[in-house]
Structures are given as C-alpha cells and as structure tokens.
Amino acid sequence: MRFTRLIPLFVTLLAAAFLIVPAILSILAGITANYFRGLSSGLTLRWIFEVWELYSGSIFLSLWIALCCLVATLLIGVPAAYWLARHPGRMARWLEEFVSLPLSIPGLALALALIQLYGSHLGFRTSWVFILTGHVLYTLPFMVRSVQAVLAGMDLATLEESAASLGAGPWQRFRDIALPGAMPGILAGALTVVTLSIGEFNLTWMLHTPYLKTLPVGLADAYASMRLEIASAYTLIFFVMIVPLLMAMQWASDRARRLTR
Amino acid sequence: MSNQQFLTLCLLPLAVFSLAFLALPLVQLLLGAAGSEAGWGIYLQILATPRYLSTLGQTVVISLLVTIAALLISTTAGLYLSRAQFRGRGLLISILTLPLAFPGVVIGFLIILLGGRQGLINQLTPGHVVFAYSSLGLFLGYLYFSIPRVLLTIMAAAEKLDPALEEAARTLGAGPLRVLRDVILPGLAPSLIAAGAIAFATAMGAFGTAFTLATNIDVLPMVIYTEFTLAANIAMASALSIVLGLVTWVLLLLARSYSGTTVAAGG
Amino acid sequence: MTLTLTNIGKTFADGTRAVRPTDLSVAEGEIVSLLGPSGCGKTTLLRMIAGLENPDAGGQIRFGDSDVTSQPVERRQVGMVFQSYALFPNMSLRANVGYGLKMQKLPRAELDARVEEVLALCRLEPYAERAVTALSGGQRQRVALARAIAPRPRVLLLDEPLSALDASLRDALRDELAELLRRFNITAIFVTHDQTEALAIADRVAVMQAGRIEQIGAPELLYRQPASRFVAEFVGDAMALEGRREGTSLQMRNGAVALPDAGAGHLPYVRAENIQISHTGPVSARVEAVTFLGTHYRVALSGLGDNMLYCTHQGDSAPRVGSEVRLAIPTAGIMMLPRSQESAR
C-alpha cells in the first residue's frame, strides 16, 4: 500500500529531474570558467559577454521579428476570430481547421512550400520579412483560437444585439463589446505568439539567410561551432528571455480559460 | 457600412494571408512533388527505395517508443499531481510544463549536456558513456519534448473527472488499483488517445532535436532536409514532406476530435 | 408614438413559419403584452419590431408616421430589455446606462445629466459606479431597463424581463416593473409566457398561439370573455365540462347544470374559482386530493367526467380525501366557447 503510493511520486520526481537537471547544467556551464575542469575553475560572466558580442544582432532580430509578428497576428487574427465567433457552424469550423494547418504540419514542410513558391523572388526571399511570414503563418492559429475561444464563451450575439438596439453600428459593436470581451484571449494569444516566435527554429532554419540569423538559428550555430561554455551561455540568455514569457503565457492562458467557463 | 460588409472586412486579412502563404504554397508543394521525371509515381518511388523505407520505419518505431514512454510517465505524474496536495506541487508542475515552448534545438543541446562527451553521465561514470548522438539520445530528446505536452492534456482531463465516480467505486469496495483500472483510466481514455497522438505526431515531425542530435541517424525530417539542401532533390523532399505532413495532420485531427484541445506541435 | 404592424410574418430559412402574417397596432403610451407558450412566435414578433429579424416580404412596420421596415436595428431607436439582460460586462453600471446616449454623440454634460436622471428614476444611484457583475438579479434588471430607456427610444421592447429572476423575487419585481413602465409613459411591448405577468403589467394582452394572435384585449376581457378554448385555457386555466347538452342544461355523470345561451357547436368551460362546494349543489363528485395553498385549498374532484376537475375552496377546513361532496356551478361562471380549436394543454 505504502509502496504503491510512492511509485507515482518517484516517477514524478524522476521526470522533473530529467527535465530540470540538463537545464541547470546548461546554466552552470554558461557561467563556469572552464566546464571541463568543473565549477572549481571559478564562475565568470566572460562567456555571456562573448555571446553578446557574437550574437546580439541575432537576439535583436528575434525581438524585432517577434514584435512584428505580434502586430501582424493581432491585425489578422483578432478580426478573423471575431468573424468566426459571429458565424458558428460548419463553414467556420472548416476555415479554422484550414488556418490551423501550420499547427499540425511540420514547419519543415511549410518552409519547403514557402520556398518553392517564393524562393525565386529574391528581394522577398532574402529579406527578414520572409522569416516574419513564416512566423506569422505558424503563430496565427494560436492567436485566432485563443481569441475565438473567449468570444465563444461570452454571449456575443445577444450583447451585440443589445448594443445595436442602443444605436451602435458594426464598428462600434466590435470596438465596445467584442474587443474588451476578447481581451483575456488577446493577452494570452499575444504572449503565446511572442514566446513561440522568439523560440521558432524549424521554419526559420529553412527560411533564413546567412546574414539574417534569429536567436534560435544562432543557437544552432553556436551548438555546432562554438565551445560548450559559449553555447551554454547563449542558452542561458535564451532561458532568461523565454522563461518569464512562458510563465506569463501559461498564467494568461489559464486565466482566459477560467473566464471562458 | 452594413453589418455584412464589416464582417467581410474582418475576414479579409486572414483570407488574403492564408491564400498567399498557406493555400498557394501547399499547392506548389504538391506540384513540386510531382515535378520530377517520376511525376506522381514519386510516392511509389519512396516505397521502392530501401533508404526511405528504413527511414520511415525507424521514425515510426522511435516515435512509437517515445509515445509509450511519455504516456506512462506523464499519466503517472499527471494523475499524481492532479490529486496530491503537498508543498512544492506548483513548482513540480512548473518544471514539468515549462519546457513546452523550448525549441527542439535547445532540447537537443540539453541532451548533449546529459549524454555528450562532456556530459553529466560521462563525467559521473567510469567508462565512456556517450549516448547523445545515438538512438537513445534522440529518444530522450523526443521524450523531453513530449512529456509536458502529454502531461498538460492528462492533467486537464483528470481535473474534469467526476470525483464522485471514484468515491462511488470506493464505497462499493474497490481498492485503489481497481479504481484506477475500472474508473480513472476508462474516464481518461479519450485524452490518453489524444495525448498519444500528439506525442506521436510531434516526434514524427521533430526537426530541431533531430538537427542537433541525429547526425548519424536517418529520421524522416533529417532525410527531407538533406534531400533538399545537399541532394537538391526538391521533388523527393516535397513528396516526403507531404507524406510526413499528412501523417501528423491526420493524427492531430484525431487528437482534437477526442479531446478538443491542442497543445502546440512543432519544434 | 403609435406602433403599427401590417401583414408582418416570418418564415425562417428552414421553412418554419414562426409568425403568420399579423396586424397589430399599439397606441401612444400603451403597454401591450405578447403572451403565449414557448414557440408561439412572440419573441420572433418582438425581434421583428426591434429590427433584429427581417419580416417576410409584404409586411410593414411603422413607428408613428415613419416606415421603419427596412431600417437596421441601430437606427430604429428602440429600447430593448433582453431576457438575459445582456449588460456589457466590461463597463460599469453608469457606462452601461450611458451607452445609448454615447452612440447618439450627446455632449458630455448633457449625457451625464441624462444618465443621472435615469438612474434616479430607476433608483439605481447608490450602485452607479459598481461593475455590473457585482449586482443582484433585481438590480441587473433595473439597469437593463434604465439602459434601454435612457436614449428615449420610440418604443420599449421587453423580452421576458422577469424570467431570469428567482421565483421569490419575481412577484415583487413584477409590480415594480409595472409601476416603472407607467411612469416612463412610453409605448411598450412586453413578451412573456406567464399569464400573471401579462395581466398585471399590460394595458392590453395579445394571446399568441402557433404564430398568430388568437385574441387581443384588456386583461379583464381576456379573462372573462375568452374568444377561444386556447385563450380560456392559457389565461386562467379554464376546464372543459363534460356531458350531454339538452337544451340549456348539461347532463353530467352525477347530475345536471344549467348553461348560458349559446349557439350549436359551443362547449361549456369553467374555472376553478367558479365551482363551489355546496350541500345543496346539483351534482356530486368524489374528492381525490386536497392541497393547502395558504389563502385557499385546491381540491381535485373526480366523477363528473373522464377528466379531473379542480375547484378552489375558501374556509378553515377542506373536505376529506375520499369523501363525496356536492357541487354548484353558477350559470354565470360557465363560458360557452366554439368547438374544434386547439387546446392550450
């Protein structure tokens, strides 16, 4: 009895250790003077500075693309989610299923598709906008679904009828009723979009050019060609950026889901 | 502006974007696959080429193993965490779910830190234990990737289980293991199927992890990548991506129809 | 503002005829209730007046002299109270009430003054700054009403405004609503499935059945002179008297009662309050059940026909269950209604 109760705890702890230990190792390696000799070689910020010198361009490019990606998904996704919420039915389900394809098709396949169609338009192919396009493609379904779920959870149709009976036109109803109501979903969607965009690798690796490296592309580069300490320091910087975003994203998603119920 | 016009305007940006960057590229991918001398017969060529077939088999086997392992671990942990109340529970849940949005490359690197030449295991053990670049390393990488996804799905489902069912079984004399077998697992079945499909699909399509670890192993995404970049065999790369895309899409569609949730694929 | 509906019907896309072509006119300041069971078309009719549904071709809706048939809801200047109240959760009570005025682009100062005025009228000042999610059911209902009348609509439309409330609150709020509506002095249409609400609040009640208005008139008229079996049964629970008609008397199983004059093809109906337990009554019945309801007893009686009859019985004690009683049914209490029409039950 006691023993069978301990097994689940043991499995849980083991799984947690499996996930957290390598992450801690990478953090330590990033601030250790010589990882091969171990912690006794002393702690240093040298690798972090070196990463900054080598890759700060990648980091800023990633932030810039994430920001643009957020703006694009807001402009495209929020109105679309509103349309979907106003047209519940088979048509909306098919459309949502289609827009969500990038969730289920591997990024590699999507990137191949994009390159084959647009690869010959060199001005587009070699600009950062090409990478942005891939990121928007991949993150858009998250924004649409997040907003749509919240809109579907409120009695949008009646609230809009109510606003209309008070004299509000279509745009005013969207602005005064739908947008404020969708806010928890927009927040959750926005955090998801930024988090995923900063960490996106699969599409980006195929779409990037040697002069346009995003943070994860830089990471892959560092893993392949830099010493372990630099790779680790770079990973550490990535963690510092992504973990707070992840936590905020999970908090916002839980909140949106609670409000929908 | 009428109501209908406004709503149409709302859909317009999505329609334009999806058409230009999703629908048309996918059509191009289909055409590209049929663009070689083999034409549509390229899919038969996949079946006739031993290298592609063994790659396909290897990818399926490793994805299946990852699915089973992730289901066992995450169901155990998920059920435990959704019931037990103890200090540190929140921290454990955070640790187990935060890697959700780690890109595959980073997970690959974390596996190298565990099982690479300078890795933890190699330092702790006397002999040379380096497994990061083997099938075991790839398996662990995919597992790292799948545990949070499966765990979230299972925990969401476990919270929706009616505790009264379990209590009813207890009042009827069922012990904990019987309750697990007769009440909890049947109640979780749709989510288990969904979570399994998610794990399998993400493992099939995982590129980032494979990119860092699978230098010597043929898994489908890596073969697609090398066909495209090194062999410049665009038709074959396209055909293989279509096969891969179809498999993962169907599986995730299945997952959604069973549980109504999707946890981020990709990576 | 008078409201005139001419030939207004509604056929849904799937072919369901929700409302058959209907005429209705409502005088300035009059409160009309649309009463009927669910699915009778009353809400659809209300939504067509609001502009939330389009009537079938050939219909016309006029507010006073202007034809509003093709006007969209936001330009029709109606006030509407929804069944769920549909208060905007992201706005305070004050912002909710002021929303319609904001849409009219009223200057700030005038808007504030008008909102204050309406808040006072609806006794909502103490809660003005609260979030609408922090209000009780009764308060929400008053906010919905205040929000609807603040822009001074041409017509006020209420869709089951009391049905979202607890039964215990409903009675008190019904009287309050009736009083507020009189005070607004506004043309109002009020949809309900509850005859007590309709009778208590409306100047005229339109009883609807299967997409058409069966009868329209003052509450007393509907109650005392129902035009059809449906109206008699739906308003005031009339019961059929079973028996053989012989001239002006009805031979029932255990005695005979005198009927009022009526043409052939009319059948007798009676209400529970018109059946009296009396030692000298001409018919006898057996007591099947007795329910004490505070002000009176409700007694179920068998033996007069195939169906159970009910009577209300005042007094300190009720007859025992199982006993035989004699009943008197005064001729004035019997309604003769045309045969072969749909029943409300």
Image (spheres, helix red, strand yellow):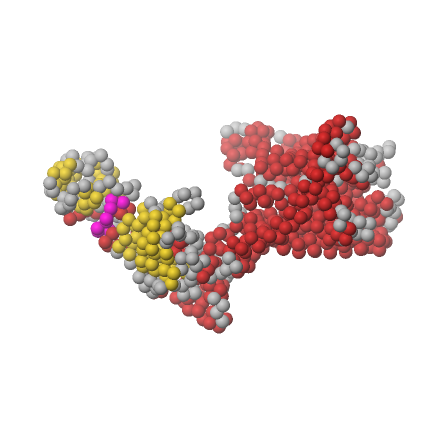
Q: Position of residue A222 (x, y in %)?
A: 83, 47
User: Going by the image, does C103 lie left or right of B128?
Assistant: left
Numbered-mark total: 0
Q: Give the camera-side residue of C25 and C104.
A: C25
* Residue found 75% across the figure and 32% down from its top: B38
Q: Residue furthest bottom?
A: C109
Vertical side of C8 occupied by B55: above or below: above
Of residue A110 and residue A235, the one placed in the foreground of this image is A110
Q: Which residues are magenta?
A: C223-230
Instruction: Measuring from the top left, give residue C52's x and y in whole percent.
Output: 43, 54
Rendered residue at 58%/37% (across/down): B257
Residue at 33 percent across and 62 percent down: it is C2
| C229 drawn magenta | yes
* Residue C81 inside the magenta-drawn segment: no
Is residue A251 left or right of A122 when viewed as pictured? left
Image coords of residue B221 (percent x, y)? 75, 37
- Quadrant for the N terminus of chain C, please: bottom left
Q: Quadrant of residue C284?
A: top left
Residue C282 visible (yes or no): no
In-image side of A17 versus C29 (left or right)? right
Q: Quadrant of residue C257?
A: top left
Q: Nearer the viewer, residue C170 or C249?
A: C249
Query: In which quarter of the view is residue C161 placed?
Result: bottom left
Where residue C245 appears, x then y in whole percent? 14, 38
Screen quadrant of the C terminus of chain C: top left
What residue appears at the point 20 percent right and 35 percent down from the top-left corner? C305
| Of B31 and B26, the residue lying toward us | B31
Question: Can residue B51 be spotted in the picture?
Answer: yes
